[in-house]
Amino acid sequence: MKVLAARRRDADDIRFLVKHLGLTSVEAVLALCAEIFPDEDVPDRARLIVEDTIAEP
């Protein structure tokens, strides 16, 4: 839900969840979103936030 919402205030939560779940690629995050919310499109802004999250050390 955080990724689909992709609000600025969700960025820290997305970072935490991605790391906590051990997701290491944008594709893995988007695949998980598609699995849980198959009828929802992931917004472009969400992809950007996830890309930034994955790129962080």
Image (spheres, rainbow, N blue to C red):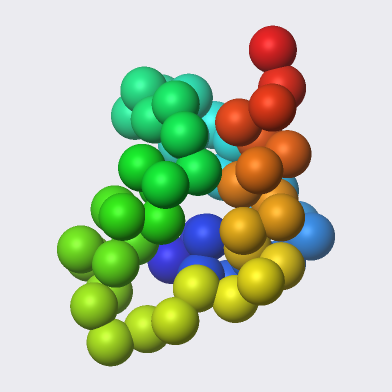
Q: Quadrant of the N terminus?
A: bottom left
Q: Number of callouts in the render?
A: 0
Q: Nearer the viewer, residue 38 or 7?
A: 38
In the image, is 21 to the left or to the right of 11? Answer: left
Residue 18 spot, x, y in % from top left: 47, 34
Please name the residue shown 69% across and 27% down the image: 55
In the image, is 19 to the left or to the right of 38? Answer: right
In the displayed structure, would residue 51 be above or below residue 41?
above
Residue 2 spot, x, y in % from top left: 52, 60
Please name the residue shown 44% across and 81% down the image: 41
Q: Most extreme residue toward the top, as rendered?
A: 57
Please name the residue shown 20% across and 63% down the image: 35
Q: Which quadrant holds residue 10? A: bottom right
Q: Nearer the viewer, residue 48 or 11?
A: 48
Q: Most extreme residue toward the right, as rendered?
A: 8
In the image, is 32 to the left or to the right of 56? Answer: left
Q: Quadrant of the C terminus?
A: top right
Residue 4 spot, x, y in % from top left: 51, 70
In the displayed structure, would residue 11 be above or below residue 46?
above
Please name the residue shown 52% across and 60% down the image: 3
Is residue 12 in view?
Answer: no
In the displayed structure, would residue 18 be above or below residue 8?
above
In the image, is 8 to the left or to the right of 32? Answer: right
Q: Which quadrant holds residue 12? A: top right
Is residue 32 in view?
Answer: yes
